[in-house]
Amino acid sequence: MPELESPVLDAPVETPALEPEPSSEPDAPEAEPPAPEGGKPGLKEGQAPPVPTDPKQLHQSVRAKIAEIRAKDPATADELKNAYYLKQDLKKEGFNSIADVRALKQTYAELGEPEQIQQSMGELGYFKELDSEFTAANPQVWDRIGEAAPEQLVKLFPSMSEKIETMAPDAFATWFSQRALADFDQFGLKEDIAWLQRIAGDNAEVKTIAEKLGQYIQRLAGFAKKPFAAPKAQAKPEGVQPTGEQNQERIELFRTLNQSAVNSEYGTELSKQLAGRQLSAAQREGIAVLVGNALTRAETDADKKKIDRYYEAGDKQGYLNFKKTIRDRNMAKAVEQAIAATIGTRPGPKPGTPKPPASTNGRPAPVPAQGIKQVNAEPAHNTVRWGRGGTTPDDVMKGIYTLKDGTKVQWRG
């Protein structure tokens, strides 16, 4: 039997006879037709009785009609009965049409086989328990995450620490200070600093260093005494735009997270291209400055407008992904050019050609410059004047440094 979109019993089974043509004499009153024997008054010959509006009366009417059909055609009566009661059962379950049944079937098919659904429910239960423990700030939540994904947990720890430091700097300082002091105690450093302060005597330099270390220990102790408390989350009312200060905090947070990714990618690319060559502190600083400038120049005006839109929308992940696409296009080239400008390129040795001697910083010793004082050690980083009017990357490549007091020296190590 073909599938029915709706039971046929919604309409009378017998087709009613056509109404007679109206009389051409409008003035003549139309006589009421007599009621057929055993029929209902008011019905014309062959006209079906009106469908009852009361569900109980409709049910009794359907039963009576099926019984009437059964006397002539039992098979058809059984099919009609099954169709009628099937529709009633479906209505009780919330299905008003075959379309509802098909929608449920499609949803079930998308969820998968029963085994897959049971597996998904098990995973959902696991994450619900995990969410409950996280919401309750239960420390055991890290045990569960550590058992399930130890490598991912370790990789996320630096960014998680930076996020906590941004969200709750006082709480982060408390935790860090407690850990640092515990480590100092383990090695007896606090007692050593106190001893250094006692024996410094008239040695001003030793005394200054000892006092500085002591002050640092006291500073850590002050942070360590503060309670570890997280900031309370404040719900933002709907429709209220963030203030200028809140926008600036959002921008700083985005930039902090992005800088963490930049540092990681830059360190990896620099190590890859150096291939074992060593850098002095000044050379490393010069390369970092050159790479940073190159990445800044790589951002077009269109890129900057798009970045501003990410700021305004508060789309942190979109901002981080977009900044990464810029680095992916430019990081390797920027590092290569910065290394070449600072320590030069290193061509591979020809077969049979002995490798020329190189100094410890990975490049041949520079030619001594006339009129510049030669020194045996690289100047300390904080004694060098950097940037415009001071030491440039080209100077660093030649070993020439301009000190903060204006003196120029050359280190040929």
Image (cartoon, rainbow, N blue to C red):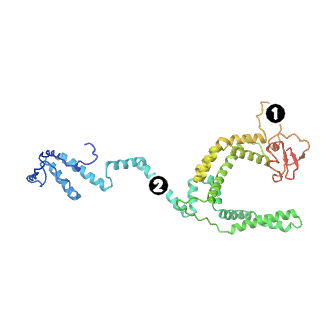
Residue that label 2 marks? 122
- Residue depicted at 91% across the width and 41% down the height: 370
Residue 54, horizontal then vertical, whole percent: 22, 58
Amino acid type, callout 2:
Gly
Residue 50 to residue 330: above or below = below
Residue most toward the right?
371
Q: Is residue 410 visible?
A: yes
Residue 371, located in which quarter of the rendered image? Answer: top right
Residue that label 1 marks? 354
- Residue depicted at 69% across the width and 65% down the height: 178
Residue 228 or 155: which is nearer the viewer? 228
Residue 293, horizontal then vertical, whole percent: 72, 45
Helix, strand or loop status at disc 2 = helix
Helix, strand or loop status at disc 1 = loop
Residue 182 to residue 24: above or below = below
Amino acid type, callout 1:
Pro
Looking at marks 1 and 2 on the same chain, the residue that comes earlier in the sequence is marked by 2
Instruction: Tell me, for residue 75, which label it has, or none.
Output: none
Badge 2 local density, few (<14 within 10 Å), some, or many (20+)? few
Residue 283, horizontal then vertical, whole percent: 78, 46
Q: Does residue 111 appear left or right of residue 68 in this picture?
A: right
Q: Is residue 275 visible?
A: no
